[in-house]
């Protein structure tokens, strides 16, 4: 008797490994580009056939051998996602039919969002209580420089823009933009269908919750969170801060512009069919499946560290 979890069975029409390379989606998650929302959509679509690389460790880039071992507990793997997915890490050695997807965001907006995320984390989790705008400004300057130094990390093993641009053109199979998020998802659905992958791109927005805390718990953080929000709201009218943002994001802007051009080409190829589709953002849309969550927490979470134990770790070259 073979026990098959819901979602582990082969999808109808899916080719076996002996027929042709299995197509799996590999989501390259760039920080603050709606990646949590996108990952939730993958979880909902693929359930226990989806693997989150955060189970490997927060600072690890997934290697081919790690992926190979992950297939021992995810034999019907159809998607992987996370900051640990890199298109230059040789994952094709395990899945020759791997399809890399990613999203980009206008760099200044991404940096400001990253600042707010980091400030919130410090306030809620590290008991930081900034009492002045000067204190927040000092953290802003430090945080922006840190985020900018990591901007090429997803597409480049060296942090160089030339390599990142080459990887974008040659290895990223689909790229969308946060500024056209719904449109990007609709085009992506048609693109995926052309590769034999059916995906429901309805989604529930992620990473805007209160970290699982109720309003009473968060109330004590309100003064500090309000100061940060007020500072962020005034950034675009502050010449000094905008000069810092433009300087810090200049290289990333080249990558963003190239990605936008690539998306425009994908839109021309698949956009007409996408126009006939509808997309729904709703809090009523699940961002996971019960069996996917259960398998991840009961099986993958405790077993993954054992599977990769002893393997050489591949840290992000730009990890601070």
Image (tube, rainbow, N blue to C red):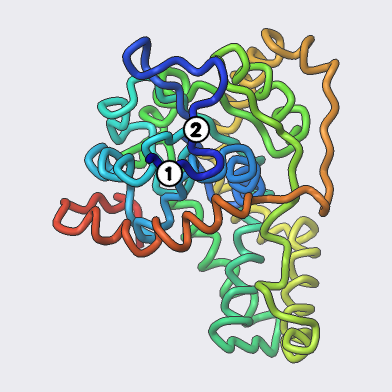
**Rendered view: 129 above or below 112:** below
Category of crowding for the residue at label 2, using alpha-carbon neighbours closer than 10 angstroms: few (below 14), some (14–19), many (at least 20): few
Are discs 1 and 2 less than 8 Å apart at CB? no
Category of crowding for the residue at label 1, using alpha-carbon neighbours closer than 10 angstroms: few (below 14), some (14–19), many (at least 20): few
Q: Secondary structure at mark 2?
A: loop
Front residue of this view, candidates 73 and 132: 73
**Rendered view: 320 above or below 11:** below
Q: Secondary structure at mark 1?
A: loop
Q: Quadrant of residue 97?
A: top left
Q: Where does the C terminus fall, quadrant-wise?
A: bottom left
Front residue of this view, candidates 95 and 146: 95
Q: Where does the N terminus fall, quadrant-wise?
A: top left
- The residue located at (83%, 17%) in the rendering is 275
Give the spatial CA distance, label 1 vs label 2.
Answer: 10 Å
Q: Position of residue 8 (x, y in %)?
A: 49, 38
Q: Residue 9 bears which disc, if any?
A: 2
Does label 1 or label 2 sit earlier along the sequence? 1
Can residue 320 be seen in the rendering of this structure? yes
- The residue located at (32%, 54%) in the rendering is 60
Q: Residue 20 bears which disc, if any?
A: none
Q: Is residue 287 left or right of residue 89?
A: right
Which residue is the site of mark 1? 3
Q: Quadrant of residue 230?
A: bottom right
Can residue 107 be seen in the rendering of this structure? no
Q: Position of residue 251 (x, y in %)?
A: 50, 38
Q: Is residue 61 left or right of residue 129?
A: left
Q: Is residue 150 left or right of residue 294?
A: left
Residue mark closest to the camera, 1 vs 2: 1
């Amino acid at each position: 008797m073979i026990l098959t979890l819901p979602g582990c069975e082969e999808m109808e029409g899916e080719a076996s490994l002996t027929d042709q390379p299995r197509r799996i989606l590999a989501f390259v998650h760039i920080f603050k580009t709606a990646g949590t929302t996108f990952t939730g959509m993958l979880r909902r679509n693929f359930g226990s056939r989806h693997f989150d690389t955060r189970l490997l460790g927060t600072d690890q880039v997934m290697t081919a051998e790690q992926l190979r071992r992950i297939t021992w507990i995810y034999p019907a793997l159809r998607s992987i996602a996370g900051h640990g997915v890199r298109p230059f890490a040789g994952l094709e050695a395990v899945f020759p039919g791997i399809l890399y997807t990613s999203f980009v965001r206008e760099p200044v907006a991404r940096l400001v969002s990253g600042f707010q995320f980091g400030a919130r984390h410090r306030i809620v989790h590290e008991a930081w209580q900034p009492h002045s705008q000067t204190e927040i400004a000092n953290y802003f300057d430090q945080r922006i420089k840190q985020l900018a130094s990591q901007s090429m990390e997803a597409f480049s093993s060296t942090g160089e823009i030339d390599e990142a641009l080459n990887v974008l053109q040659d290895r990223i199979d689909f790229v969308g933009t946060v500024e056209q998020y719904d449109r990007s998802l609709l085009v992506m659905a048609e693109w995926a269908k052309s590769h034999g992958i059916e995906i429901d791109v309805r989604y529930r927005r992620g990473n805007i919750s209160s970290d699982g805390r109720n309003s009473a718990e968060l109330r004590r953080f309100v003064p500090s969170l309000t100061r940060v929000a007020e500072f962020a709201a005034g950034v675009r009218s502050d010449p000094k801060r905008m000069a810092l943002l433009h300087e810090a994001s200049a290289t990333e802007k080249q990558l963003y512009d190239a990605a936008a051009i690539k998306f425009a080409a994908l839109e021309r190829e698949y956009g007409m069919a996408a126009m006939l589709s509808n997309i729904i953002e709703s809090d009523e849309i699940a961002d996971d499946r019960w069996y996917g969550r259960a398998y991840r927490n009961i099986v993958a979470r405790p077993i993954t560290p054992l599977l990769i134990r002893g393997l050489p770790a591949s840290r992000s070259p730009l990890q601070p």
